Image (cartoon, rainbow, N blue to C red):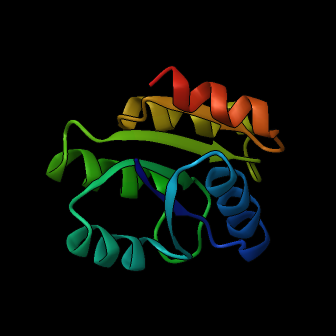
Amino acid sequence: MKILVIDDDTAILKYLRAILKHNGFNVLTADSGQKAFELLSKNQDVTIVITDIIMPDQEGIEVIRKIKSKHPHMKIVAISGGRKMSPESYLQLAYAAGADATLKKPFGERELLNALHHL
């Protein structure tokens, strides 16, 4: 199974990549929405996207909406630590935009794998 992880924080990208690869997933990473869409266009076999909500160039809510409009069956996990609003508020917006699951940062390996298992 191929997963695309989108986050502007390189430490989080490395952390998630390590967890996912250790658990047998094929992982692609992008540090922006624009790079994510480039990767998705070249990798038609991506089945799950994990995206941060707060990113500088393109908010995760917009990324979720665009992915769902082009790939309605793709599963999306939204992640957020919040900023101006609580993480729960951002994650509620992510559900409204089409996310299939959400995780509040910080989260651990077990929480991530559990979310993926229930998609």
Rendered residue at 69%/52% (across/down) = 22
Between 75 and 93, the one lying in front of the other is 75
Farthest residue, direction left = 70
In this view, 59 is above or below 34:
above
Q: Going by the image, does 46 lie left or right of 109?
A: left
In this view, 40 is above or below 116:
below
Task: Give the total number of marks visible in the rendering.
Answer: 0
Residue 4 visible (yes or no): yes
Residue 76: percent from the left, percent from the top?
Answer: 42, 41
Residue 103: percent from the left, percent from the top?
Answer: 67, 35
Q: Going by the image, does 119 lie left or right of 86?
A: left
Residue 34: percent from the left, percent from the top?
Answer: 38, 78
Between 50 and 34, the one lying in front of the other is 50
Q: Going by the image, does 6 lie left or right of 72?
A: right
In this view, 44 is above or below 87:
below
Rendered residue at 72%/61% (across/down) = 18
Rendered residue at 62%/59% (across/down) = 54
Q: Going by the image, does 113 lie left or right of 39?
A: right
Residue 58: percent from the left, percent from the top?
Answer: 46, 69
Farthest residue, direction top = 118
Rendered residue at 62%/57% (across/down) = 21
Between 100 and 65, the one lying in front of the other is 100
Q: Check the picture and name the quadrant holding the C terminus.
A: top left
Residue 92 visible (yes or no): no
